[in-house]
Image: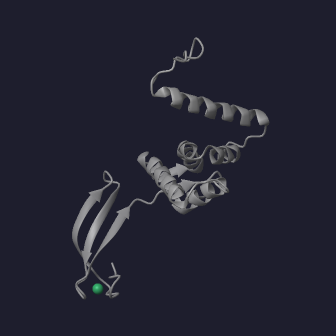
Amino acid sequence: MRCPYCRHADSRVVDSREADDGQLIRRRRSCPECGKRFTTVEEAVLAVVKRSGVTEPFSRAKIMSGVRKACQGRPVDEDSIALLAQKVEETVRAKGAAEVPSHEVGLAILPPLRELDQVAYLRFASVYKSFDSLDEFEKEISALREAATARETGVRHPVTPRSGGRAPRV
Ligand SMILES: [Zn+2]
């Protein structure tokens, strides 16, 4: 590999080690010409298969632009969006497949987005799950409300009985 400092055409690997549970390999390289050292990272290319059958490389930037659109006007900063995209990539890569269908990428976005901003989540989910009636919005909103209630009471009652009505408030 070409040296990024002096553009010498070759470099020598002085160390290589696995990172992220063997998902990637980092190599420390040394340039025989200028003596400088640099690091390269090698990882499997993750392909996303679109509904049309077309494949394209997984792109965090693409996740970020989709989420950014859903977050318009919401108090969500760029760092949180970048972090979300990172989580999505980790989730998708953790499946260990070289190819993932694009809808699985969409599914991986939903849970962290719900944590980040409920309005943005609702916008994203309405497009992603193609809501076509108010009922579907209503269902999603009541699911959000239930989750919020469960979170509030969950500290004291980690297991809320689903049958026999609501857990009594203490
Ligand atoms: Zn060099």
Whether residue 151 is situated above or below residue 16 in the rendered picture: above
Q: Position of residue 141 (x, y in %)?
A: 67, 35
Q: Nearer the viewer, residue 161 or 104?
A: 161
Expressed as whole percent of the image width and height from the top left, the position of residue 71 reads 63, 54
Quick check: 144 left or right of 21?
right
Which residue shows up at 57% across the image and 59% down it?
A: 64
- Seen from this angle, which residue lies furthest front? 170
The answer to whether 41 appears left or right of 91 in the picture is left
- Colour option used: one colour
Would residue 11 be visible to someone looking at this image? yes
What is the residue that sits farthest to the top in this orientation? 164
Q: Is residue 147 left or right of residue 83?
A: right
Q: Residue at x 53, y 45 (%)?
A: 112
In the rendered image, which quarter is residue 135 located in?
top right
41 is higher (above) or lower (below) than 84: below
Residue 122 x/y as whole percent = 66, 43
Q: Quadrant of residue 150?
A: top right
Name the residue at 60% across, 29% down: 146
Q: Decide which of 73, 55 is in the foreground and name it.
A: 73
- Which is nearer the eye, 163 or 117? 117
Quarter of the rendering occupied by the N terminus: bottom left
Residue drawn at 35 percent across, 82 percent down:
4
Task: Report the image quarter containing ligand 1.
Answer: bottom left
> Which one is nearer the viewer's eye here, 76 or 83?
76
Q: Residue furthest left?
A: 14
For the question of whether residue 59 can be seen, the reply is no
Residue 7, quarter of the rendered image: bottom left
Task: Indicate the position of residue 128 as horizontal and vertical percent values.
Answer: 66, 46
Q: How many marks?
A: 0
